[in-house]
Image (spheres, rainbow, N blue to C red):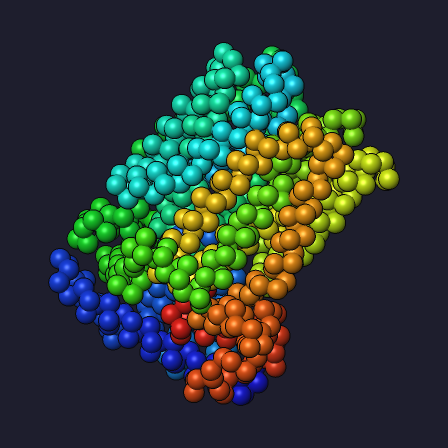
Amino acid sequence: MKPSLRASSHAALDRLVHKESARAKHAITMNRSSSVSVGIGPSNLNRQDQSRRTFYEALPFTTVHGLQFKEHVLHKVLSQKSLRLAGEEATEESALLADVDVDQVIVTAPLAFAVFIAVIAEFLVGYNTSLMNAPEAVVFPGHTTAEWSLAVSAFAIGGPGGAILGGILANKRGRRGALLINALIFLVGGIILAGAPSIFWLIPARFIIGLASGFASVLVPIYLGELAPPTLRGTLGTLTQFSLVTGILVSDVLAYPLATAQGWRFLFAVTALLACLQLLCSPFLLESPRWLLARDEKSRDARVIMKKLRGFREAKEVEMEVEHMMMASRRAKTPHNSAHSASALYDLFRDPSVRLLLISCLVLQISQQLCGINAVFYYSTMFFQGLIADPLEGTILVASVNVIATYVALKLMDTCGRRTLVLWSASGMLFSCVMVTMALYHVVPDVVALLGVMLFVFFFEIGLGPIPWLIVAEMFDQKYVATSMSLSCQVNWACNFIIGIGFPFINAWLGKASFVPFGIVLALTLSYTYFYLPETLGRTVQEIQQLAAASTNPSTPTNMRGTVEGKFPASSENKHRPSYGTNGKGEGGKEEGRKQRVVQSVEAGDLALQV
């Protein structure tokens, strides 16, 4: 690192710790009337604990796919600060030791058990997404297109209600109790699905499973995020995403031998079997210590659980960890970060600085579903009929590409901008639609249709798959995150239902041009993204909102890839900082540039993920 960059970075780190200490003092003042005070103020914290508290307050209490890079960079930044507070030279060896000091990542047996049981629910979400794909021809032969499409899409009808129910029960019954209820709902739906005497019974069964899936999509990230230390939340977020896409793949692989007149009920029964396993194991799970502390800050159970989860030996270690968690929770509940949902929704549409951001979020959610991705996961076997020798093999290949692309997306998500990935994703999917259509019209060999669908799924997974969810949390401060996320979720499920019930009719009416509507949606998405979607990687919420507000003013020249030209005010703190682009390149190199952006984000009270 060059001297000027080192000095700038050290100065930024000094400001970071000062501001975090001030925030902690403010939180203690706001909570003097609380029933318990652990008695550990910021001024009494040692160098490791100061950094660890910052870590707790900067990262969300939820597992988020794509969060690992931010965890890694913040970890490095705080580790170096920990060394400087001790007056040590930041050598390579000492930096490694400081990494361990800031947040020791110990995966204890209770935490590993909780993760294994919880991700079964995410696996079942993926499994049931693709479950109806392969066995259509053998399940109650003679059914009409309307009957089958309703049975498939009933899954999406139950999803929104399940998402709402999951949040309510997680708060009332606890995370462990809600997980048990979720497993019970999966079990009931799975039993009805496997034992259905007619196709009409599949409709309520799929609705119930959709209810459980929406429930799980809210509950599992919260539960694991509150059990895990901050440095594991991104990893666990990726694990839940891999569980979902693996569920899709396993569903298609099992269908290969079981999608028969005699075997389809066994294929459907897997949901009930896994739900039963989860139900039997749920009573042995640990409750979320954060939920227990929210009900009683003196909770002895919360401290016992924390000791088991972290592998602590000393009582003072447990108390310090509890204090970190409580301080982070209090900060999230300060009046500045809370608002009535109806008021927040009204403000979202009224405030020009966030209105365009909300529209952008909703456009991406609509595009994510209306681009036709679930037409592939719901109906690819039907679509491949007559195009390739074995449609089931094609479906398995597509699901395999989905898993591989999830890993590729993880590598790309924080090395490329969000906006860039959406542009690549929409462009690649649009090209794939052209390939599929050309194959259907026999301009190119039929096998190109399979290749086109595989590319369609690949490009979806690197952009339009993860980014619409990640970008919601990056565009808004905590006042609006919950409301915008809830609205995005409902819009997403509604569009999912439209595709689920509509694609069989689109395929019947348009035939060889069945992918043309998806191409039109992708072309519109590409245009909107290029002109209106701001880049969020490496920016604070305030910068993103300034950029969006300026873009609505015709007299203000803007660049959605970068900054508002000549309009961002330069604070006294920012004037002497080195400049880094969104790709992380600068005089000090990519790694230092990304560290600097994380420091700036934390200084602003925002790590681009406040959920």
Task: Give x and y (percent) for residue 56.
Answer: 36, 62
Q: Residue at x 68, y 47 (%)?
A: 520
Residue 503 visible (yes or no):
yes
Task: Give x and y (percent) for residue 42.
Answer: 26, 72
Front residue of 494 and 405: 494
Front residue of 602 and 37: 602
Residue 229, by quadrant, is bottom left
Q: Residue at x 40, y 74 (%)?
A: 603
Q: Residue at x 50, y 57 (%)?
A: 359
Residue 67 visible (yes or no):
no
Q: Quadrant of the N terminus?
A: bottom right
Q: Quadrant of the C terminus?
A: bottom left
Task: Give x and y (percent) for residue 133.
Answer: 62, 28
Does residue 278 appear left or right of residue 45 in this picture?
Answer: right
Front residue of 153 and 248: 153
**Labels in figure, total:** 0
Work out whether 212 lies above or below 29: above
Task: Give x and y (percent) for residue 53.
Answer: 33, 66
Q: Residue at x 68, y 38 (%)?
A: 398
The outermost residue toward the front is 554
Residue 556, by quadrant, is bottom right
